[in-house]
Image (spheres, grey):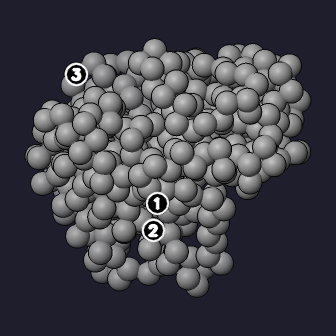
Amino acid sequence: MTHAPANPGRAYVPAAIGTEAATFRATTRIVAGPGALARTRAEVERLGSPRLVVVADRSLDRVGLLQHILSEARLGDLVVETVLTDVDPDPDPIEAAASTARAANAQAVLAIGGGSGISAAKAVALLLTNHVPVRSLEGVDKATAPPAPTIAIPTTAGSGSEVSNALVLHDPGRVREITIRGDGYEPHTAVLDAAVLRGLPTEPLLFAALDAISHALEATWARGANIFTDACALRAASELIETLPRAVSGVADGRNAAGGNDPALQRLLEASALANLACGNSGLALVHALSCSPAVPSPHGYQNGVLLPHVAAFNRDVVGPDARDLIDRLPGLYDAMRFPTRFPEGIADADAMIAASSGHAFRANNRRESTDDELRDLLLAAGADYRPATR
Ligand SMILES: [Fe+2]
């Protein structure tokens, strides 16, 4: 697939320089490394030993990982309530979880899970201190009180939600997800310990990592990019591209499960958080603008993984040489992972994806502007379905 560059002769100029002030904020305290889980109690004590509500992915309870994490974290008497959430939570169960947490007099949240689990926990943290419907917090800086402090333990390496000030909830029937974002909405502390990734099967491991690579590379072609986000984005993308094949091969040969691949898994986890420090400050761009339609039911990381090479090619001429080198490493990575660059038929509706991106801040934040026709070409190349007769 080829795309004509928007400004063929333009040299790379960091977007923020000469236009508006660069901003960068990274306030989450990160505790990372083998054995970090055992530091969790000390981290809670640093916060004054608040009463904790655990908000965790239900799937972690089913496989016993939740119990293992809680035991390693040595929280014992500090946990006053546990709420389990489903993937892609919508507002109703979030509000029910917050009521349960309030009834237990919880003062802080321990978030355990992947991107959607940590999103749910961050929403509960906001509702602990803001007694309003969660939908009323949609947008930026809508909460009147800061959220209850949250300690996040990510169980996938990809979303970066453990360091992000944004959370996403699903609202069936709407053209887009509900996004809630604000300064101070990020977890107070993130505990990054590769041991929690040991049991991950190939697909969730791979999809989450492709999401993280999307976060890092989107940060390089975002209009909000600056020297600080570039430093995080370039290092994160390089680490992720280099480490992912080793992390994935460790599933098949059993090294991950045995703990023998923890160094690779730890790098993946840390680079995922770093990628989010980049995109959380630069803003996301076209990959995420196209993947935000609830009408496309496949996992976020899978969708972003398929879209990424196409959006990267679209943006290749508007990034600097370091980012271009990383873009050029994608085909080799995808070959090694045997990951597709096309959606199977019947999965992705091009019109729904373009409609979701229309007027979206992520699309406007993409350094190269895009027309709907250009996006339709890009999505067709990515195997999306297009039914002109229904338009
Ligand atoms: Fe993402």
Which is more N-terminal, label 1 or label 3? Answer: 1
Alpha-carbon span between mark 3 and mark 1: 34 Å
Q: Position of residue 379 (x, y in %)?
A: 30, 39
Residue drawn 70% across the image and 16% down it: 92
Q: As drawn, is 45 to the left or to the right of 377?
A: right
Circle 2 residue: 232
In what element is the residue under mark 3?
loop
Q: Amino acid at mark 3?
A: Glu
Alpha-carbon span between mark 2 and mark 1: 6 Å
Circle 3 residue: 345
Residue 87 showing in the rendered view = no
Residue drawn 75% across the image and 16% down it: 96
| Contact between labelled residues 1 and 2, with CB atoms less than 8 Å apart | yes
In what element is the residue under mark 2?
helix
Q: Position of residue 78 (x, y in %)?
A: 74, 33
Q: Position of residue 366 (x, y in %)?
A: 46, 58
Circle 1 residue: 274
Residue 24 showing in the rendered view = yes
Q: Amino acid at mark 2?
A: Cys
Vertical placement of 388 versus 186: above or below? above
Which is more N-terminal, label 1 or label 2? Answer: 2
Q: As drawn, is 95 to the left or to the right of 377?
A: right
Q: Residues within 10 Å of mark 2 (few under 14, many from 20)?
A: many
Residue drawn 63% across the image and 57% down it: 28
* 140 vs 33, nearest the viewer: 33
- Kindly identify which numbered label has been placed on residue 67: none
Report the number of numbered marks: 3
